[in-house]
Structures are given as C-alpha cells and as structure tokens.
Image: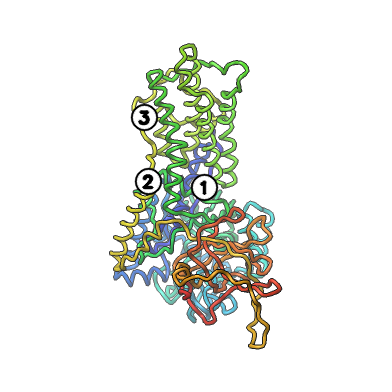
C-alpha cells in the first residue's frame, strides 16, 4: 500500500530559552500526523529543528557570559531532548547554524539580489528586538509592537529590502485558487483582509546592528534577516540548491505537503515564505496549518514564580503517552486549548485508566479466569430474539478507521482520537450487554462466552492499532499483552483477524494507574516551591494557585468609548447590590490587560474571543461585545480585567476572566481602561 510521499514540517523552535509545554505541543501534533500517515501507506519525511540566529540570542548569550554558539548549542540540545522525551519520530532535526544551511541561505540571498528582488537601502523606524521587526508609527498598537506588545525603540540602519509588492497579486490569486492552502479558514481571511489586500510594504531582509547571523557574503557588514534565514530551512534541510544542484531528495519531497505552525507566526509562513519561493521559482507548499495555542490555565505563568509547566514535569507525573493524549485530545481545531493539573488528573483517571486501561485489564483477566488465557472464536451468536450486540460491535469496530482517517485528513486530530475512544467505550458497553460473569455460571453458555471474549479482544486490537500514532508505547503494550502485533490500517476494515486459540499474558499490566488529585497537588507544590527557592522568590503560596483550575468567567458588553462628561452631565442611578466587606472585595484580583488578538466566536451574534496579555500570561476571555466592537477594534486596547474568576464555557469556548465595561442608559458600552499608560499586568487596587 504505497500512497506516495508526504513531507511534513514543524516551525523550528527559537533557541532563546527552554520551551514550556505549550511550545512542545506542536512537535507532538506533527508527530501524530506523521505516524498516522506512515501507517496509512505514505512515505513520510518529518522535519523539525531549531532557529538559532538573531539579536535576541546575541543579547541572551552576552547576559549568560558565553558565545552565541555556546548558548544555542545548549538550548538546541535541550529542545532536541524534549522532542525525544515525547517519543517523536522526526526524520531530520535541522539547526540553522548547520553549515550546509548557512551556505544555501547565502546563495539564496545572492540569487534574489542578482535578479533584482532584493535591493540596498536604509531603514529608519521603530524596532522591536524580541520580534526583530521594524514598524512604522501607524502600525504600532498603543505605541507598542503590534505582534508582541513590547516596547519599540527608534532605529536607523543601512539594510537590504525585498520587493514584496512585486509578488503580492500573484500570491492573492494562488490563495483564492487554492482554498485549502491556509487552514483554518479564519487564518486565511486574516491574512487576506489585514495584510495582502491593503498592500504589502517592502521587507527588510538584512541587519547591521548585530553580528549573530548568517553574513551576506558579498557585503559582510550585513547579516541575513532571521526570517529569510529560518524559513529557508524547509528546503535547505532536504537538499535545495539555489544554484541549480538540488538533490534527488529535494526533487522527490518538495513541495511540502504540510507546514504545521503556531497561529502567531502565520503571517511569516503564508505571506513571506510563499513570496520567497515564488521569487526562487519553486512550487509553494500544499498546505499551511496555523494551529491554536495550548495555554496554561492555572494561574500566571512565570519563571520567577517557578510555576511554568514543562514537558518533563508532566512526563514525570503521568508518563509520556498520557501527556501525548492530553495535549492532542484537549486542543480544539481552531480555538485555544487549556492545560491544568486537575484536568490532567481527570483525563488520566476517566479516559486512560478507566475507559481504556480497565477495559484491557478486564478482558485479559476474564480470558485467564475462564479459559486459562486462551482466546477462541466459536462464532456463537446471540440467542434468537435478542439484540445483535455482536453485529453492533463489529460495525463500530470496522468503521472506526474510516471515521478517524477522515478527521485526520481535515487535521482534526482531537476528533480522530475521540472516534477511537468511541470504539473502546463501545467495547465497555458490550461487556455490560453480554455480562460474561453471568455466562460463566452456565456451562451451556461456555462457547458463547468464548465468542464474547474473542469479540472484545478483536475490538480492542483494532482500536489499539488506530491508537498507535497518538500513544505508540501504550498501543504496543496492549498488543504485547494479547501476544500479537498491531495491524496495518488497510486491514482494519475486517473483523476476526486475531488468531483463534492464541493465549494472552497471564499477568496483565496496569496501563494507567489512577491518581489522587490531592497527592498530585502536594507534589506539584513541592516542585514549584523548589523552583521559587532556586529563583530567590519567597514561597507565598502562588505555586498552589498555579496548580489549580483556571480562574475564568464571561463578561457581557463593551462598545463605543464614552466621552468623559462634566459635572453638569446627567448621571445614571442603578439598583444597589448588597453591602460587602473589604474582605469580600479583597478576594477579587483586577489587573491591566492588553488585548493582543481577537476573533469572532463562530455561530454567535454577541461573542468575541480575545487573547489578553496580563504580565507574562496570556488569557482567553469571551465577551458579549460584538454589537459594540469589531474584533479589529479590540486589538491593542488596554483594559481592566477580573483575572481570578472561575472558568466558564460560552458557545463551546473557554473563558478565563472578565473584561470590565461601563454601560449608559441607552445600553451603550465602553471598556474600562487606565487613564494613563500602564504596563500589562499592573495591579488595580
């Protein structure tokens, strides 16, 4: 079953520091797709790696007292270790400090310059160091970088520029002719409406104010702009040569079938990268998917507070496959997902220990108890007149692959996993329907009991074979306990392939042990306390808060900003609420937040979903303000946020706080904002 090549990439991780679990989600997502495609008959090549140049890294290295190369070597090693610890099956790990990559980037730059796509000029504007981007005054949001919300500084330097507008119309035409090119559709609409159609400015593609980058070989005062350098990894890693000597591997693999990236870098991958490729005369990737974020929903994430969640933390507490299951299952297709310690424990106990683990253990234990571990297919159907539960189980089992494969083709990975677990749930229901313990009491029902246990075994193994891309070690353990192998996907439409007469293990392994939330929380707090001590931060109990569930709520309203009135302006009287004490008020935590992204909630006439930066944390807040503000108007606003409200779900979207508004007699709403410029995270008291 050879379905041809499938080339999948992740964004390469920036080596400015150790990635937390939200950054690690992408590699697991890509790995699950790559593994699924391999089992589905594709010749898969899966590339990931690290982005290692730029001013930010040069500054970080200086602070650490090491050379930039020493700094990135250490961080790149940590990132690769995380990929390996999460059991990812990448075929190549590229580093942008690899000599072959650097040489090709120099060739690419020279070729684009020689053909007139790059020209030399000077740039004067406002520069954001973390994003390594120049901005004009009109592009800023409240005087800050529109991408990250940080401070910008005036800068002027000689630079090379790429003529973006030369290819803009061609890119627009390509996107319109290939609706699958940018997914989800909301990301495509954002790029078209906010960037391409208003017109592209020429892009600065070199720098002279720092040296940690790939030198422009014909003008060594300049280093190549980090995005031209980093994006090129997708072709340099498989043998592209800008001078025409590309390898057979490149000729086979390119164009990429899927670039998997975070939604925060969608613009670079769907505008800059395709235009660079057009200028080089190379085909565009088939699809670019901007996945949502996996957010830490249990308190402000801060390295100084020691409550950042890393992949290694979760693996120590729950195991690799449980972590893989959680981050894949909890991430919606388009909206952001949430990770909390208590939700991890809940999913492990309910889905993994109960639905899956208990099913496997019960089935093997009953085979050992009643038949010495031998599983035999007697093909004895249900009694006449009874519901044909065997046929129902078989129908679900043999159709699960098609349902899961359809979801995977749409990149709806969480939904594919749900389909597989629907089969395991059907197997559990089959046990309740057939009641093997009752059949065992009747000698005349012995062959029927054997058939029931065979059907259960077959259903479990079909599910385990489908589960392998998502939880590879768990799937292997299940097959091993039944003394068989996991099956290729092209056999999963057939029920009854498990060899009759096979003997299962006499010592079934507990796949997932149930965990006590209180005990987990104690261990988590100990871990956070150790980190706070290492950081020199007093242990004031914030770690316990970070281990709990998200503070969240919904807020209705907001709209046109109300003009400030004078003393003669008529006021509004509202019905008084019950008197509270200061202690009641002190329980509420208000902070200044900065809205860095906002989008409409699908199928809702009232709701907007905002990403609100509060200090170092980003919260997702759903507000009923669509009739008063557009999503575009929301971005960049400084707002007053109630941050410790209990989580709520509105129209299927989790909300983690409340934006405060004022409302006049006509029902007009205005967001409450600080009178003077205040940083995000500032406490309101």
Residue 98, position as x, y percentages in the image: 39, 58
Q: Which residue is painted at 63% across and 83% down in the image? A: 564
Residue 513, position as x, y percentages in the image: 37, 40
Say whether disc 2 or disc 1 marks the residue closer to the N-terminus: 1
Please indicate, yes or no, whether residue 164 appears anywhere in the rendered image. Answer: yes
Q: Crowdedness of circle 3 by 10 Å Cα count: few (<14), some, many (20+)?
A: some
Q: Secondary structure at mark 2?
A: loop
Q: Which residue is painted at 52% across and 63% down in the image? A: 657
Residue behind mark 1: 7
Residue behind mark 3: 508
Camera-near label (3 vs 2) is 2
| Separation of marks 2 and 1 at Cα, in angstroms | 42 Å
For this rendering, which residue is in front, 603 or 648? 648
| Separation of marks 3 and 1 at Cα, in angstroms | 39 Å
Q: Crowdedness of circle 2 by 10 Å Cα count: few (<14), some, many (20+)?
A: few
Camera-near label (2 vs 1) is 2
Please indicate, yes or no, whether residue 84 appears anywhere in the rendered image. Answer: no
Image height of 97 relative to 415, above or below: below
* 318 with respect to 387 (left or right): left
Residue behind mark 2: 516
Question: Circles 2 and 1: CB distance less than 8 Å?
Answer: no
- Taking the view exactly as shown, the residue that stands out farthest to the front is 578
Say whether disc 3 or disc 1 marks the residue closer to the N-terminus: 1
Q: Secondary structure at mark 1?
A: strand
Q: Which residue is painted at 38% across and 70% down in the image? A: 58
């Amino acid at each position: 079953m050879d379905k041809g090549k499938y080339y999948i990439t992740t964004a390469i991780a920036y080596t400015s520091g150790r990635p937390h679990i939200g950054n690690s989600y992408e590699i697991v997502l890509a790995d699950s797709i790559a593994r699924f495609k391999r089992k589905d008959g594709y010749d898969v090549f899966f590339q990931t790696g690290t982005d290692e140049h730029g001013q930010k890294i040069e500054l970080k290295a200086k602070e650490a007292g090491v050379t930039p190369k020493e700094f990135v070597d250490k961080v790149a090693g940590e990132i690769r270790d995380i990929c390996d610890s999460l059991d990812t099956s990448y075929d190549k790990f590229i580093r942008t400090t690899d000599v072959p990559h650097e040489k090709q980037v120099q060739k690419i730059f020279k070729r684009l310059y020689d053909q007139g796509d790059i020209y030399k000029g000077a740039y004067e504007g406002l520069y954001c160091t973390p994003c390594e981007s120049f901005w004009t005054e009109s592009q800023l949001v409240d005087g800050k970088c529109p991408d990250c919300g940080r401070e910008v500084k005036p800068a002027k330097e000689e630079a090379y520029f790429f003529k973006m507008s030369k290819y803009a119309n061609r890119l627009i035409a390509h996107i319109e002719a290939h609706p699958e090119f940018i997914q989800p559709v909301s990301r495509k609409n954002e790029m078209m409406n906010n960037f391409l159609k208003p017109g592209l400015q020429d892009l600065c593609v070199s720098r002279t104010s720092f040296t940690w980058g790939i030198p422009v070989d014909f003008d060594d005062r300049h280093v190549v702009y980090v995005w031209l350098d980093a994006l090129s990894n997708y072709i340099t890693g498989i043998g592209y040569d800008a001078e025409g000597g590309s390898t057979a591997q490149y000729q086979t693999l390119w164009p990429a079938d899927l670039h998997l990236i975070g939604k925060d870098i969608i613009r670079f991958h769907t505008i800059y990268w395709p235009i660079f490729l057009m200028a080089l005369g190379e085909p565009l990737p088939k699809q670019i998917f901007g996945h949502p974020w996996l957010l830490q929903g249990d308190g402000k994430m801060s390295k100084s507070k020691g409550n950042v969640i890393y992949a290694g933390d979760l693996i120590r507490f729950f195991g690799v496959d449980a972590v893989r299951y959680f981050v894949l299952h909890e991430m919606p297709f388009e909206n952001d997902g949430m990770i909390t310690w208590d939700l991890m424990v809940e999913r492990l106990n309910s889905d993994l220990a109960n639905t899956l683990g208990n099913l496997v253990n019960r089935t093997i234990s009953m085979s050992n108890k009643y038949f010495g571990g031998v599983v035999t297919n007697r093909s004895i159907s249900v009694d006449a007149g009874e519901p044909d539960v065997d046929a129902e189980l078989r129908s679900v089992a043999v159709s699960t692959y098609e349902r899961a494969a359809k979801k995977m083709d749409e990149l709806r990975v969480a939904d594919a996993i749900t389909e597989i677990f629907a089969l395991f749930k059907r197997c559990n229901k089959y046990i309740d329907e057939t009641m093997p313990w009752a059949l065992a009491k009747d000698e005349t029902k012995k062959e029927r009991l054997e058939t029931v246990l065979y059907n259960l075994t077959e259903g479990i193994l079909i599910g385990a074979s489908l589960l392998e891309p998502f939880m590879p070690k768990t799937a292997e353990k299940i097959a091993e306990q039944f003394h068989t192998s996991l099956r290729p996907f092209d056999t999963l439409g057939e029920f009854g392939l498990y060899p009759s007469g096979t003997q299962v293990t006499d010592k079934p392994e507990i796949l997932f042990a149930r965990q006590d939330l209180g005990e987990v929380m104690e261990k988590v707090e100990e871990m956070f306390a150790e980190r706070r001590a290492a950081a020199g931060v007093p242990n004031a109990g914030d770690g316990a808060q970070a281990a709990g569930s998200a503070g969240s709520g919904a807020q209705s309203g907001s709209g046109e900003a109300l003009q400030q009135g004078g003393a003669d302006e008529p006021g509004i009287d509202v019905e008084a609420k019950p008197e509270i004490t200061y202690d009641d008020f002190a329980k509420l935590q208000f902070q200044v937040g900065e809205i860095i992204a906002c989008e409409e909630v699908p199928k809702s006439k009232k709701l907007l979903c905002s990403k609100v930066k509060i200090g170092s944390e980003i919260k997702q807040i759903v507000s009923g303000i669509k009739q008063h503000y557009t999503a575009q108007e929301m971005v960049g606003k400084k707002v007053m946020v109630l941050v410790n409200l209990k989580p709520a779900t509105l129209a299927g979207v989790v909300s983690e706080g409340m934006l405060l508004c004022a409302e006049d007699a006509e029902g007009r709403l205005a967001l409450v904002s600080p009178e003077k410029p205040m940083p995000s995270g500032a406490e309101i008291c």
